[in-house]
Amino acid sequence: MSDNSKRKPKALVVEAELLSGSNEFIREFFVDAPKNAELNDYVDFRTGVILHYQNDNFIDFETEASLLDRNDSFLDLTLAQHCKHGKTLEKLFAKAQESENLPLKLACLFNKTLYQSYPNQRIPVAFFTKSEFASWDFLSDEEKERINNWVVNLCDQEVEVLFSNETIDAHFLTEFLKAENNAWASLTEDRKLRVLIGLSRNRRVSEPFDENDYLMSGLTEYYYDELFHTIWDLAKSLPVTMPIAWALTELLEKTVDKRRHFDSFDVAKRWIIDGDEQKTKTAAVSLNAFESVRYSIYRNIMTDYFGQNRSNLEYFQNPDIAYRACSYRYLRNWSLEDIDYVFQKDNEISVRHLLMNPSIQRNSKFRERLHELCLEIDRKNPGDLIYISMYSGMLKEIKKKNPEFMKRDDESEWIAQGEKVLNLISLRDLIQESEEKQLNALSDEFLSLRLQIKRLSSVSNWLLGGGIFLAVLIAIF
């Protein structure tokens, strides 16, 4: 029996409540616990990061141990996903490994509460140590090798869940993904594909460094960004196959664009298949898998030309369709002539990527031109409203994220399933014109009345003046 003399009173009450409650009550309590906990700042002086952790102290290890002692499979799954203490998770993980219980293994991999309670401890390190203050950096080479070997032998589902968990130890992840890591190199192509899929669902890859969350910047930012550099470097060594290409594109599109020692043109060459950089692809609807990877890689070199004898036309005339498509999305300096030029060159591909360009989105004239092009494409495919739908989706996205772009958007409305557009701007102008005509007509009538009144007034004044003159003459004579 545990020594309760050193435990907090509230923890004893919570334990009694949980032990007397149903499994459903216990699960609900653990799920809601993070929402009700107070967050405190903890400074990790090893990395300089300011971590926010739950400091309720109501669910202590003794409480979780009491629930573990019930040996209830439902409670085991609940604790595996929501427990706060590393020793609890380590016991559950060992139990799952020993019994080859896949659902319980996956439940352990889903756990995100541990990190919120003990910021220094993250998965997968927590599975292999009893210390609640251990991290990847403090493990021995033998311990690191043990964890790497464990990852190599995971099944597909375990790989995807592990690498999609944003609380995964970033230092472990960075080291594991390096090309020189034997564990990573030993993975089959299909297993690497699973890693990429998992990472593309991991919020950590899309969260840039925020100096407000760090006590010290500089070197801290350098190490934080190391994960981004490593992910981008995957394009230098991954197998050049269609499944890998699609998964890598998804990952790179979501990953913060931080690269080091990365020659975009050189890396992109790996993903050129059968000389497809020479294809004009004027009839293509979208980029293929390999072109999509190159499209992502080219992103960091899209800079508008403003110098003498250079213009963005250099981008538009590049033989690589991926390079051109990338320029359509990311270049900032545009004209209506440019839009017409790229549409003639790449048709539907140009429209797809122009629709995603913020510089196009914020300009009403450019939006109107894109709308016309979308209608033109859809008219060639009766029954399809793909591009009108894409344009409508763009407008909704702008209104949601950048409403300042839409100075005239509230004046447009889609009707008849996108085939016709009611231009409220024209309607407004028509009404204004009609009102002006009416006002002008009224004004003319008013002026005419004023002239008539003026003439009548002149006559009356003359008559009045004549009457006074006649009266004076009568008085004289």
Image (cartoon, rainbow, N blue to C red):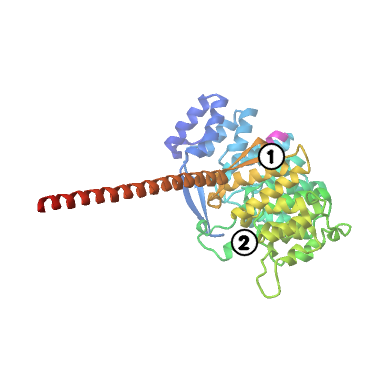
Nearer-the-camera pick, 203 or 387 = 387
Can you identify the residue that label 2 sits on? 223
Q: Which residues are magenta?
A: 101-105
Q: Amino acid at mark 2?
A: Tyr
Residue mark closest to the camera, 2 vs 1? 1
Instruction: Report the label total.
Output: 2
Q: Amino acid at mark 1?
A: Glu
Specify few, some or many for label 1: CA neighbours under 10 Å numbering under 14, 14-19, or 20 or more: some
Marks 2 and 1, how far apart in space? 52 Å
Q: Residue at x 63, y 60 (%)?
A: 225
Q: Is residue 406 above or below residue 270?
A: above
Specify few, some or many for label 2: CA neighbours under 10 Å numbering under 14, 14-19, or 20 or more: some
Rendered location of residue 243, percent (x, y): 81, 48
Rendered location of residue 354, percent (x, y): 68, 54
For residue 424, say whether it is visible: yes
Nearer-the-camera pick, 210 or 354 = 354
Task: Report the side of 384 relative to 136 (left or right).
Answer: right
From the image, give the main secondary structure of the stretch colored magenta.
helix
Disc 1 element: loop
Q: Is residue 77 above or below residue 254?
A: above
Q: Residue at x 82, y 60 (%)?
A: 270
Q: Residue 102 colored magenta?
A: yes
Q: Residue 400 colored magenta?
A: no
Can you identify the residue that label 1 sits on? 419
User: Could you tell which of marks 2 and 1 lies nearer the N-terminus?
Assistant: 2
Q: Is residue 54 above or below residue 43?
A: above
Rendered location of residue 198, percent (x, y): 71, 46
Rendered location of residue 107, percent (x, y): 66, 37
Q: Residue 238: which quarter of the image?
A: bottom right
Q: Residue at x 13, y 50 (%)?
A: 474
